[in-house]
Each structure stands twice: as C-alpha cells, then as structure tokens.
Amino acid sequence: MKKYLKDIGINIEELETILDFGCGCGRVIQHLKLSSRLVGVDMDKDAIKWCKNNIKHAEFYHIQPFSALPFDNEAFDFVYAISVFTHFTEELEKFWIEEIHRILKDQGIFLLTLRIGPFFLHPFTRKERKIFEEKGFVSQHPKYAGTLYCNSFHSLDHIRRTFLKKFKLKLLIRGGATDYKQDLLILEK
C-alpha cells in the first residue's frame, strides 16, 4: 500500500487521518505505526471487540450495513478497503461509495481492491455469467453480503459507471493485491 501511494506522489506518513474501512481483525492497521489518527471500522462486532482489546494505536468502531459512518463530512485524508468491496451486493456497494465520498476530504485518496472480471477461484454458473455480461457486476451468495461468503465481481464498465462517477482514477493495477488475488485501484475525490 505504501509503495502504490508513493507511486502517485503520496507519503502515507504525512497523512493526518486514515480510515481502514472493513478492518476485520486488524490485518492491515496493526502494521501501521504512524503519528496519524488511525481508525478502523467493520460490520463484524467480534472483530471490532478484538481490535479494541489488542491494537492500542488506533480507534475502532462497529458499523451497520446501510448506516452512516460516525464521522463528519470530509474527516479523512485516506481511506483504504482491502478485500471489502469484493463481498458486497450492488446496493451495498452503492451506499458505501456515497458514504466514503462523504467522509473523504477534497483530493483525499481512496484505495480499494476488487475482482475485475470472472475469477478462476470462484467459477460462475451460467446464470451468473449472463448477469455479469449484462450488468458488468455479479454477487455470488448475495444473502451473505458483507461477509466472506459473498463474492462480487466487477467489469471495467461497471467501475466507470459507479466508482468513477464520484472519484478520479489515479492508478489501476491488475493483480496489484497479490495476497488477495485482487486488482487494486487508487481513486481521488
């Protein structure tokens, strides 16, 4: 993450406010030892409880789907969501794009990972392939949206129609999140 930010001219250590959106058990935020205000949010109540008890250099908040984040407008310089939007339905994604746009400062940076196109680890059924070809977006197991059991896939056209309506594309690296086998986007408000 630090390297990709540096590639667009941003030093993470100079950012004042950073949000880990979908922090889970703190898999990323625990490694960020910065003087910045570090905040993590997640829909998993148990993960947030664990983070509060074990990661002392950051603040943590439990959030609900389709509920506003507990932050003022333009509160953050940088928001990252690693392997989070890969588990949303289209409706949940739309809501969180708006909410992240709201809490991000002007010229703030939003780094996220997505699965662009069909993915070999989660083969499509015929029905899913048809939906993906028509809409450019499909969620597998949507009743589990927001959990690891739901897997979502995006086309470049869908990304243009959704994320790029609110943000400017700074960087797209296919396979950029190698640990998660996902594509990485850096967007600017």
Image (cartoon, rainbow, N blue to C red):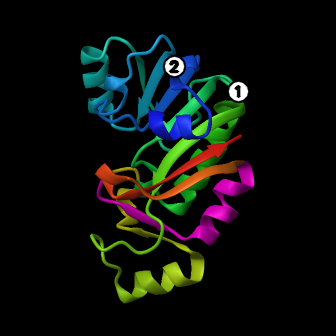
147 with respect to 66 (left or right): left
Q: Residue at x 37, y 27 (%)?
A: 29
Is 145 in the magenta? no
Q: Residue at x 42, y 44 (%)?
A: 82
Q: Is residue 12 above or below residue 7?
A: above
Q: Is residue 4 visible?
A: yes
The one of 11 and 49 positioned closer to us in this rendering: 11
Label 1 vs label 2, nearer the camera: 2
Residue 61 rendering spot, x and y as whole percentages: 43, 24
Q: Which amino acid is tagged 2?
A: Glu
Q: Please provide the residue range marked out in magenta.
A: 148-166
100 with respect to 86 (left or right): right
Q: Residues within 10 Å of mark 1 (few under 14, many from 20)?
A: some
Q: Which of disc 2 and disc 1 is earlier in sequence?
A: 2
Q: Residue at x 29, y 23 (%)?
A: 51
Image disc number at residue 73: 1
Image disc number at residue 13: 2
Q: Is residue 64 visible?
A: no
The one of 72 and 86 positioned closer to us in this rendering: 86
Is 164 in the magenta? yes
